[in-house]
Image (cartoon, coloured by chain):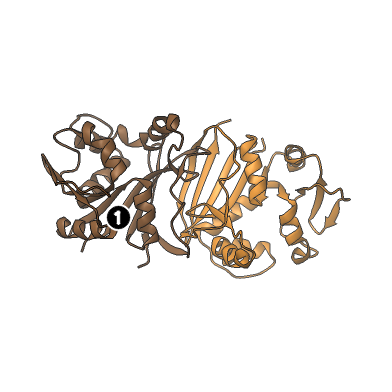
Chain colours: A brown, B orange
């Protein structure tokens, strides 16, 4: 059965991006930088080389387990051009947006634009995933909505060892009420700590 | 040489206490509850029994390494009465406060009230610790001040597997500028994950 998984790279103080436009790239690179040199990640981008580490194995495992992606409109808009003709997904992608648009077909993947909200996008992604997992790639707002609505089975945090002191907090807008978690993986990586949690549903 | 260490029990979304008075005890118990059944913690409170787990070993290690404590006035005020004649410290305690007060002597420990600020309290605690570590027990405000002022060598996070959605955030008021950390311990416990970080100083 498909699990619904969100994964986020995050600083120790809970930031996933820069709120100040001038800080966008520096924060992005600091928080996500652990992934750029991994063999599994480079292979998926069509590059060779890279490090074969436990972190690379975890990323490869996430790629292999994923049958469909869900992402927000902002993330898609950032990626559409740089991802080019062969985006790094290999399975269907569902984009949550307010703007209707025809599906976009690319090599190895397709982008379906869902205007009925996150829950509908996840439902369509579960069908497309054919038993594999549905993977929420972000941004923060999509993950916050999924936590608040109780739509997640697992949350994979890739914690970068830094205090940023400012930025976009993952933990805003996650709704009232306590949400109990079970740790399912606690793994030190190289320049990152992998903390995987399961939600009680 | 003495290290200056702060340790905090914290939810996955970064809360260390309740901001709403009615939530104070429930949040305290949820975030700190992992410690109450540990053999090492119970022994220090003058109780017998408890679990001998890796978490208990880490708590015993913190007790053994600590030569002096620094705490805020609010924490002292909460504890003064329940701690009784033999408070659970066994080494000198320095209380950061705006109110002058004569030192208080108790079995195995003493409380010195420092009105010259946190940096002075830490300096006095380093002297008293005679080469062992200085341990900041909280509350949040003291730890935030220490992070902002660059006074910490290590930060020990005991992460409770829960999203609380509201409360007192540890990561507010820690000052501008990135603070790079090095993970020195990533240890799964029972109902808690121990994440120890070292500051670059």
Residue A197 seen: no
Residue nearest the observer in this picture, A7 or B4: A7
Residue B141 point in image, percent of width and height: 66, 48
Quadrant holding the C terminus of chain B: top right
Instruction: Check the image and name the residue furthest to the right.
Output: B102
Local secondary structure at mark 1: strand
User: From the viewer's perspective, is B196 left or right of B72?
Assistant: left
Q: Residues within 10 Å of mark 1 (few under 14, many from 20)?
A: many
A46 left or right, relative to A4: left
Residue A133 placed where, x, y %? 22, 56
Determine if residue A114 is in view: yes
In which image quadrant can residue A168 be found? top left
Residue A64 drawn at (x, y percent): 20, 49
Q: Nearer the viewer, residue B132 or A87?
A: A87
Q: Residue at x 28, y 40 (%)?
A: A56
Which quadrant, please, contains the N terminus of chain B?
A: top right
Q: Which residue is mark 1?
A: A5
Q: Which residue is farthest front?
A: A99
Q: Chain of mark 1?
A: A
Tell me what residue is drawn at x 86 percent, y 48 percent: B100
């Amino acid at each position: 059965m498909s699990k619904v998984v969100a994964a986020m790279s995050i600083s120790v103080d809970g930031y996933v991006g820069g709120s100040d436009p001038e800080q966008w790239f520096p924060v992005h690179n600091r928080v996500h930088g652990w992934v750029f040199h991994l063999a599994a990640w480079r292979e998926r981008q069509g590059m060779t080389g890279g490090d074969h580490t436990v972190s690379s194995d975890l990323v490869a495992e996430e790629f292999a387990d994923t049958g469909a992606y869900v992402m927000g409109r902002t993330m898609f808009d950032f990626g559409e051009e740089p991802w080019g003709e062969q985006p790094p997904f290999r399975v269907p992608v569902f984009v949550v947006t307010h703007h209707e648009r025809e599906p976009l077909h690319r090599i190895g993947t397709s982008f379906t634009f869902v205007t009925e909200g996150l829950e509908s996008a996840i439902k369509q992604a579960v069908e497309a995933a054919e038993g594999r997992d549905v993977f929420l790639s972000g941004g923060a707002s999509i993950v916050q909505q999924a936590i608040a609505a109780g739509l997640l089975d697992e949350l994979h945090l890739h914690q970068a060892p830094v205090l940023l002191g400012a930025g976009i907090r993952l933990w805003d807008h996650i709704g009232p009420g306590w949400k109990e978690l079970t740790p399912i993986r606690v793994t030190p990586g190289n320049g990152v700590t992998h903390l995987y949690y399961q939600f009680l549903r």
